[in-house]
Image: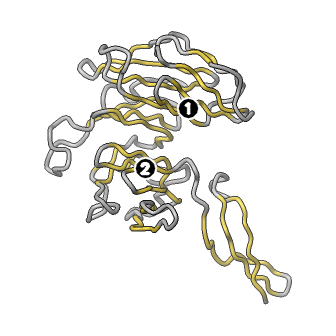
């Protein structure tokens, strides 16, 4: 008999590549074990000198203070079986981790961070859930979490209906509004504090097909106001695969290239030029 080592796509998630070992005996090939799974490149978050990376059923905290010698300081694995982590986001002292496709445990887990990784015990402080649904993308602004589920609808949670979020005896984060808050056909989301006016607590940037839709969030009234009407088209026939907003620009990734859009005025975003790396 001999061993065969391959690099192949995961059968449960084609965006994950596995190093897998097989046993070959008398012409019969049988799978032995997965040696390593490649980290999905979009599933990481940065805090101080720590990089948090989700890799299937674990989250790694990696000390990158010495970029020539990064080292893993902690590996967090879920207590719940078949929970796989996807998108990560750092907000203040907390790490938010959404469930990945294929996970049997949905929702967004919230972990308390310290200087080397996660506090002990490492169980989530909170879990934002949508029964029977998976949050596929989300953004955190102030005390609010905005999430898109696998039905492409938008949900909103208030993280701090009372003052002490860390206190387990305090009131848990509450879902805001209807279930979902806004039905739609959204794929990706970015959000940030409103820098153009004081009218809103946050501006949401949502993709729907080849459209960018912007909304203003008023936390006092729990209302969402459309800012750019029917939306602004970016020149792609495909859904967006990513969106990131910084400064006056939104970078939107698609299978046919990335597009840079000016969002200095959330009410009138526009494409700045041709696709980058089409």
Residue at the spot 46% in from the left edge and 41% down from the top edge = 135
Which of the image's four quarters has the C terminus?
A: top right
* Residue at point 40%, 62% (across, down): 78
Task: Tell us which disc is closer to us: 2 or 1.
Answer: 2
Q: Report x, y in % for residue 145.
A: 35, 35
Q: Which mark is residue 54?
A: none
Q: Which image quarter is the N terminus in?
A: bottom right
Name the residue nearer the viewer: 210 or 157.
210
Q: How many marks?
A: 2
Could you classify mark 2 by the number of other residues whose Cα lies within 10 Å: few (under 14), some (14-19), or many (20 or more)?
some
Q: Position of residue 44 (x, y in %)?
A: 49, 51
Q: Residue 77: x, y in percent? A: 41, 65
Q: Which residue is mark 2?
A: 46
For the residue labelled by badge 1, is the local secondary structure a helix, a strand or a loop? Answer: loop
Of label 2 and label 1, which has the lower sequence position?
Answer: 2
Q: Quick check: 211 left or right of 158?
A: right
| Quarter where residue 238 is shown | top right
Residue pointed to by mark 1: 187
Image-based side of 249 in relation to 235, left or right: left
At a point 64% along the width and 23% down the height, the residue shown is 210
Residue drawn at x 26%, y 65% is 120
SS assignment at label 2: strand
Left or right of 192 on screen, residue 10: right
Residue 225 point in image, percent of width and height: 39, 14
Tell me which colouring the rendered structure shows: secondary structure
- Neighbour tally class for label 1: few under 14, some 14-19, many 20 plus, Cα within 10 Å: many
Compared with residue 272, is residue 60 higher up or lower down, i.e. above or below?
below
Query: In whole angstroms, how far apart are the C-alphas of marks 2 and 1?
Result: 23 Å
């Amino acid at each position: 008999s001999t061993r065969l080592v391959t690099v192949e796509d995961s059968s449960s998630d084609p965006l994950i590549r596995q190093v897998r070992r097989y046993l070959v005996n008398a012409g019969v090939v049988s799978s032995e074990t997965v040696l390593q799974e490649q980290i999905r490149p979009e599933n990481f978050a940065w805090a101080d000198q720590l990089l948090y990376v989700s890799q299937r059923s674990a989250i790694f905290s990696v000390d990158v203070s010495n970029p020539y010698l990064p080292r893993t300081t902690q590996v967090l694995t879920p207590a719940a079986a078949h929970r796989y982590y996807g998108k990560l986001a750092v907000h203040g002292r907390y790490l938010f981790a959404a469930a990945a496709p294929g996970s049997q445990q949905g929702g967004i887990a919230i972990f308390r961070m310290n200087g080397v990784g996660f506090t002990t015990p490492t169980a989530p402080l909170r879990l934002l859930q949508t029964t029977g649904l998976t949050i596929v993308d989300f953004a955190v602004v102030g005390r609010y979490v905005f999430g898109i589920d696998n039905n492409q609808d938008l949900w909103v949670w208030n993280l701090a209906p009372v003052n002490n979020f860390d206190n387990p005896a305090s009131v848990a984060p509450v879902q805001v509004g209807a279930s979902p808050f806004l039905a739609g056909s959204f794929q990706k989301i970015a959000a940030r504090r409103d820098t153009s006016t004081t009218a809103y607590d946050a501006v949401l940037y949502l993709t729907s097909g080849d459209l960018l839709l912007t909304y203003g969030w008023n936390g006092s009234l729990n209302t969402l106001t459309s800012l750019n009407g029917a939306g602004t088209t970016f020149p792609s026939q495909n859904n967006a695969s990513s969106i990131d907003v910084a400064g006056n620009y939104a970078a939107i990734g698609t299978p046919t290239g990335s597009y840079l859009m000016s969002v200095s005025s959330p009410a009138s975003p526009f494409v700045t030029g041709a696709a980058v790396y089409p």
